[in-house]
Amino acid sequence: MEFEILLVDDDSMICMVHRLLLQNAGIDSKPVSKGNGLQALRHLDKESRNPNKRFLIFLDINMPVMDGWKFLDELQQREYKDRVEIVMVTSSVNMMDRNKAESYPQIIDYVEKPLELESIKRWIKDPSILPYFS
Amino acid sequence: MYKSDKHTYQQFFNLIPEPLCITGDDGFIRKVNPAFVELLGYSEEELLKMPINEMIHPVDREKSLHEIEKTFNGAPSKGFQNRLRRKDGSYIWLEWTTTPSSDESYFYASAKDISKRIATEEKLRSVIEDLETAQKIARLGYWIRDLQTDMNIWSDQVYRIYGKDPQQFTPTQQAVEDLFHPDDLQYVKLSVEKQFRENDFVTFEHRIITDKGEVKWLMERSHLIRDDQNRPVEMKGTVQDITETKQKEKELKISNERFEIAIKASNELIWDWDIETDKVNRSAGYEKFFGHDFSETEGSEGPWLKIIHPDDRESVKESLNSLLTDPDRKLNTHDYRVIRADGEIAHVTDRAFVIRDENGNPVRMVGAVLDVTKSKNLLERIRKQNKALKEITWMQSHTVRAPLSRILSIAELLKNGEVSNEEYEILFESVVTSAAELDEMVREVAAKTESLNRRDNGV
């Protein structure tokens, strides 16, 4: 089994900071950064051809071209959707967004920026997440 | 000769058209002439067998017997009146002229039928009584003024109106005018003079002040009487106390004025639609309402409908129709737009109240139109401000959050993790640019708020 981490945010600085945070938390591989939902979807469509590959995605909501919600809707049409875990990382502080996010089966958590080390330590305890960090 | 004389008297007695009788001291009639028989309807035989007091009306009986007694004592009498019963049971009023015989054993009597006169008198008396009652009810008094002496003659009611005692007050014209309200005297004199130049009948109103200090309103109707050389000799007139009517008129006027002031102050315009005649009356304010002239009475399809905004016209008609046709409804409120004479749009709230007859059919509709343009405009301004405020809020929650969360994320990373020198440089540079971005946004928010303040102050 292969595990890949995908950072989806139009703010490249956020992507970089998150990458450094995850590396400090001890991830195995180098995360892939994508600037919006469409770029992320193209990457996944290609990489998922390897049936042994699973993906952990840190997903922003407000992005140009294709936002986080549209990306989630598109994902539901894909055969590899069950090989994906998603953490929503947003600058929104809206309760409606939180409730909407929880209706997607791939969402394992919903956090507001900044992403904190404490949160990462919590996810690692999850057996399905642990392999990304070993 | 005597026999011949007696025969002559007998013939006279029978011929005289006046009813005559001779009555004895036994109370029986001795002799009657045909006129007497005809008057009472009994036959001569019946009359001669009946005591005279049986024919007299019971009420008149005692005074009649007293009168007969006087006659027998030698006093001829004239003008005594009583009633006798005719054969058909009816009573007849008679006036008697009597004279006793020389030996006082019988008396001659001639009767005159005065029933008609009595009936007329009674009728007149009742008319006068009715008239007096009517005068009292109408508080109407009569007066006559002699123009030579300037002396007035007053009926009792005039004394009552002026609050004067007939025994103590002499109504000379000067004394009467002294009772007039000082503010009215000059006006009354001029007005009466002017009217008499055109007409012998004048009508005027004036006030008097009674001795008790009470102010009364009087209505006078005068008639100028002229002699055969057409010179005025006297004035006759009626006077009526109209204080109560005046008081009510005044109260009504005050109430109307209050109502109109209220209408002006409230911006409300009252309309009143008579459905049967399809006439609409509008309160005074309409004349200049929205710059249009509504002084003319108009129908429901009149000029008001024409100034209603074309897009709202149908809905106004429908709304009124639904109120007219639904017997369970009384009130309806409808908001619509009207076009002012200057072309501007005004917003109104029109409240209508329908009045129905006993069968539930609408007969009248009364309504009040309130100009709500000001509050509408205020609402619109609040709506715009809300939109601007939402924009500011959105900018704060989304745009401002982005550089802020970037700074916070970098802080979180540097607090816990290790980064290379090269990475540190990049992160530091990002904190600086993010801070500058934030600074600019805060300035933008301040500028927007400032522009809202300016709009609020009407600049």
Image (cartoon, rainbow, N blue to C red):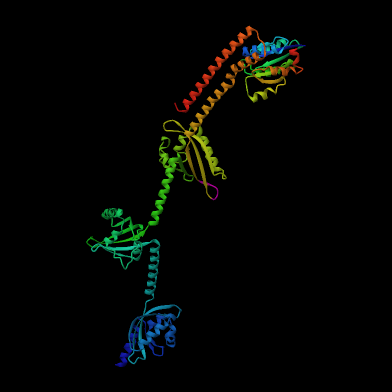
Prevailing SS of the magenta stretch: loop
Horizontal side, residue A30 vs residue B320: left or right: right
Quadrant where the C terminus of chain B sits is top left
Report x, y in % for residue A34. Answer: 65, 12
Report x, y in % for residue B181. Answer: 31, 56
Q: Residue at horizontal 30%, vertical 59%?
A: B179
Q: Nearer the viewer, residue B16 or B441?
A: B441
Q: Nearer the viewer, residue B453 or B406?
A: B406
The magenta segment is B358-363
Horizontal side, residue B219 vs residue B300: left or right: left
Q: Quadrant of residue A88?
A: top right
* Whether residue B24 is situated above or below residue B406 in the rendered picture: below
* Farthest residue, direction left: B229
Is residue B311 one of those drawn in magenta? Answer: no
Report x, y in % for residue B129. Answer: 39, 68
Q: Residue at horizontal 41%, vertical 46%?
A: B257
Quadrant where the N terminus of chain B sits is bottom left
Report x, y in % for residue B228. Answer: 23, 63
Whether residue B278 can be seen here: no
Is residue B361 one of those drawn in magenta? Answer: yes
Horizontal side, residue A130 vs residue B231: left or right: right
Q: Quadrant of residue B394?
A: top right
